[in-house]
Image (cartoon, coloured by chain):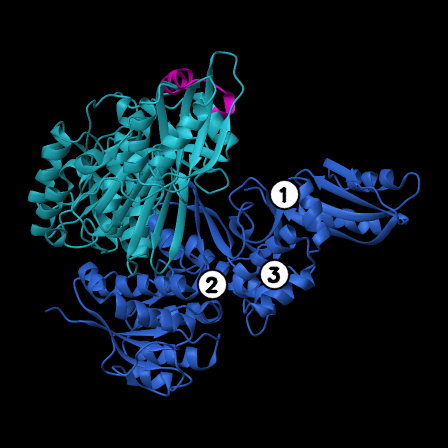
Chain colours: A cyan, B blue
Amino acid sequence: MPDPLRLGIAGLGTVGTGVVKIVQRQAKLLQARTGRPVVISAISARSRDKDRGIRLDAYAWEDDPVMLARRDDIDVFVELMGGADGPAKAATEAAIAAGKDVVTANKAMLAHHGHALALAAEKAGRVIRFEAAVAGGIPVVKALTEGLAGNEISRVMGVMNGTCNFILTKMQHDGLTYEEVFDEAARLGYLESDPTLDVGGIDAGHKLALLAAIAFGTEVAFDKMELEGIERITIEDIELAADMGFRIKLLGVAQMTGRGLEQRMSPCLVPDNSPLGQLENATNMVVLEGDAVGQIVLRGAGAGEGPTASAVMADVMDIARGIRLATFGQPASGLAKAKSAKASIPAPYYLRIKLQDKPGALAKIASVLGDAGISIDRMRQYGHTDPTAPVLIVTHKTSRAALETAIAGMAGTSVLVGEPFAIRIEVV
Amino acid sequence: MPDPLRLGIAGLGTVGTGVVKIVQRQAKLLQARTGRPVVISAISARSRDKDRGIRLDAYAWEDDPVMLARRDDIDVFVELMGGADGPAKAATEAAIAAGKDVVTANKAMLAHHGHALALAAEKAGRVIRFEAAVAGGIPVVKALTEGLAGNEISRVMGVMNGTCNFILTKMQHDGLTYEEVFDEAARLGYLESDPTLDVGGIDAGHKLALLAAIAFGTEVAFDKMELEGIERITIEDIELAADMGFRIKLLGVAQMTGRGLEQRMSPCLVPDNSPLGQLENATNMVVLEGDAVGQIVLRGAGAGEGPTASAVMADVMDIARGIRLATFGQPASGLAKAKSAKASIPAPYYLRIKLQDKPGALAKIASVLGDAGISIDRMRQYGHTDPTAPVLIVTHKTSRAALETAIAGMAGTSVLVGEPFAIRIEVV
């Protein structure tokens, strides 16, 4: 009988409970696939008595996850508590120091401390695996690190916050305002306790930063990411964009440019007939582009008990099978410091403005755009009853700098009402 | 300086040339990611003098791939010749016997001899990897074997022959007949030298058989697969299906049922708004369903120099990184013999018939269906100028047996013109 792989699980929320269920239900299958039993030795959670619908009495209990991480009877510390700092980080560091491998679903911790943790793990000869931290059940960390390992990656894109996609698609289908759907998402329990993590793009930004580190061989640089949430998106924008053949998505894009690493998580327009455009509800999608493989699209559930536990188990199974990989796909000490670039790659833009309804107003705006070197692909002025005319412009490719010049110029025309609202159109 | 991983490449067609290009172009990247140089030591191909647009003079040459496989200066035998038997099989066996790992893109060889080769490799302590054999650049073998390793897989589906999908979508968009588009595909070089491999579903069937072995822990059983090609699909079927909200795809489905393993590669209807329905041109798509993860969809190029070479390199990189896995995800000696089941899971069907244009004809058909226990979801009779009326029926879920009873019953009604044509509607 080969040695079992012994897990210590810290955190028994949705994901932790899901992992325990898989280990209990699929013991035979896991052993057939890895050649050894995969067992749970010890657990830790905030409440010992809460009924989670699973039997836990066969496992040793630790109140303190740090003590769990140091136990002699575990090989892998499975960190499912969450939080960038605090107990999750302390216990992860303790596990590495005690010679344990680590499997975690904690994107916040890795986005902030991933490089330091990876260095520590490599020094200790241990691995940190985090498939569950990015896009739930979609095996995207594996696809990028291993499946596309022969590629120079040119771009990584993704819709990686299911809650935001739920809100945006629900607004569109039901014609509801952002506030109305936000309240519904809150009622359904879709939002983090601090909703800014979701709707502000922070949670999705954490995930993108981890993928970017793997893709481009750079140290995780979440602090260099351009972040913009979906709070300013109106049902009007969604409907006008649809009218032009686009959908609005909270889209992450990371790409290496001549000027450095560009990372942004922000609302973008994508064509409604593209895989990203067709993504509905809380589903996640990641698009990977490499010089040899072209474009690979991965789609699946980005959250939830089963999908996230599936990803945790993928890492556990790898370790059980003896598969050992550097945290970000290559030795952390060899990762380059990311030189960070402001979004510099030209793109078409969607521009929504309101004009005073007087002769020559539109001509003035068009001339400001022309002066900034921006040419117009399509323009629509919509019927209106109030004295301001809503105008929608889709530009040809232009730089962000030129766009900002034009927007500043519009303010000086005296025909504008309110602020222009611009959204990048990502070429997918 | 760590030891290099030394490749011997047999076959320098499209894929082999692509692999050489990646090894030459990305030497630095490959070494950064694996921690060791990845180099080519020796090559073999049918013609030594052919200009492939790449420099080969640094590599030893072997006329005989078997001699290449046995060379002392290679660690990995990369088999890119193709063909189920002959030199590919002889050289693969020689490589294993000589203690080499094997990377192959050869679905035909593995569909027919995969189990025997896996047994031999395991006995010799060597690995056989075949990411490139299934769905080109999509890392689906890895996703299934490793990424979803914690799941009991319930179903694997895929559009895995780009040529067939090209033909079917081109027929639809351009309103052309099967024969017309087949000729165009031939002109474009999209068809195998024996086109039956493509349009008869055999090539895609090979791929599905390999995925089924991994998914269900069974010996490869290509000989038990139900195979049906796209040759009988008419432009009329495509248009009528579209009218009902469906697309016709050459779809592979493998699932474990109470009665055994069901494997079929055949034309199916799928909803036009599903990811499978929206798949255009030569792109491939694989859908994996597991008890924990739910549904994962993978999409990408299924063929071509870059994508297939990318998949070959994924396997090479795994070996360079020390990742070693059983060929089908678990020891070959432990794989179950697949008990094979005829497609038994009830499904809705699309049924195209032609009726004599006389009173009561439709009623007779409806009554035959009712007698067989089949209820009708939708029925349309189309306008016509000749004396036969085209009728389209979409049934509710029914067994194949009941459908066959009904079809036999229709023949006895004397209102039918020609043969009914039935296509399964896959619930995706």
Mark 1 highlights which residue? B246
Ranked by sequence position, the earlier of labels 2 and 3 is 2
Q: Element at badge 1? A: strand
Disc 2 residue type (three-letter): Val
Q: In the rendering, at what x and y percent does residue B374 appear? A: 73, 39
Ranked by sequence position, the earlier of labels 3 and 1 is 3
Disc 3 residue type (three-letter): Leu
Mark 3 highlights which residue? B227
Mark 2 highlights which residue? B220
Name above or below for residue A116 compared with residue A149: above
Q: In the rendering, at what x and y percent does residue B211 appear? A: 45, 57
Are discs 2 and 3 both within one chain?
Answer: yes
Q: Please identify, in this view, whether the residue under mark 3 or under mark 1 is nearer the observer.
A: 1
Q: Residues within 10 Å of mark 2 (few under 14, many from 20)?
A: many
Host chain of mark 2: B
Q: Is residue B5 left or right of residue B325?
A: left
Mark 1 touches mark 2? (CB < 8 Å): no
